[in-house]
Image: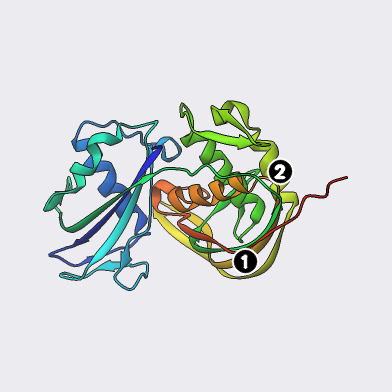
Amino acid sequence: MIGLLIKVAFTVDWEVTFNTWCGRFANRLVSEVLGGAGFNVPHTAREKPFTVSPIFDFRGRVVNRLIPGEPYNVRVSLICSEIDCSTIPSLFAKDELKLGNGEVIKVIGVEVNEVKPEVRDDYRAVFRWRVRFWPTSFIFRSSYITWPSPARFFSSAGLTLARVLRGSDLLISRGGEALLGAVGDVDFKGFVKDLVFNTEVLSMRFRRVVLNLGRGRRAPAFEGFAEYVTYTDRPGLFRLLLDVANAYGVGKSRALGLGYVIADVVEESRLSINRQ
């Protein structure tokens, strides 16, 4: 296990209108629950041992307010190499979660799933795959990238994979030979570059947004859909990148609820190996 996904279903007794992006409320909820149990949660977003989803209503829509009695859900994704995951589920599995300002969250359900990357065989294949992006923001060379760039997607997922596997004994095969210690033995940077070179965008439909993160901060972002085609001879790692993106999101400010995605394979075509 390299991580935990904790989905919390909740309701409230008072109406809350978000004047800023709802991910800030989700971040505060998770930070206070962890902090109240003695976990040190750094203020710098990039150092936090978790990512969060936006807050969704029961129809799967991102909300801008909470209505008393209505059900909502939020997901927190924990990196277990950076925080002790063993006791955290019990912190959320309570009838109520109290915030520092006196607000109370009524918990109506908690779902816990382990992040366990699968080890898959390698072969040559072409994948047609798609991604549903909720508000997402990439950054490259201090510039915001507000469209579903496959290069930024793979780069972000690759960095996250290296981060969550740090200290892991996960086995990944290369050329039929199992490798121990994936971070040290697999050239993620080279693999990501290879994926980018061998990926094309088939279609995309998105819109650009600007999110109010509070304290005068505004984040350019985008949301929508994209479909891609990728050739690779490392389908195990390719699918592992999609798994990590689904678990932890992509892009920047993920501890504030940005970058939540659902990525899935639409079609896989295995290619025969030419033998002389």
The residue tagged 2 is 193
> Image check: 249 left or right of 187?
left
The one of 128 and 9 positioned closer to us in this rendering: 128
The image position of residue 39, as x and y in percent, is 26, 32
The one of 22 and 206 positioned closer to us in this rendering: 206
The image position of residue 200, as x and y in percent, is 72, 60
> Image check: 245 left or right of 66?
right
Q: Distance between the residues labelled 1 and 2?
A: 19 Å
The image position of residue 68, as x and y in percent, is 16, 69
Locate residue 266: give its quadrant.
bottom right
What colouring method underlies this structural image?
rainbow
The residue tagged 1 is 227
Which residue is at 57% across, 51% downward? 138
> Looking at the rendering, in which quadrant would you find the N terminus?
top left
Q: What element carries label 1?
A: strand
The image position of residue 189, as x and y in percent, is 66, 37
Locate residue 58: give its quadrant.
bottom left
Crowding around mark 2 (Cα neighbors within 10 Å: few <14, some 14 to 19, many 20+) is few
Amino acid at pointer 2: Lys
Locate residue 12: give its quadrant.
bottom left
Which residue is at 20% across, 58% downward? 109
Relative height, residue 9 to residue 68 (above, below): above
How many discs mark residues in the rendered view?
Answer: 2
Amino acid at pointer 1: Glu
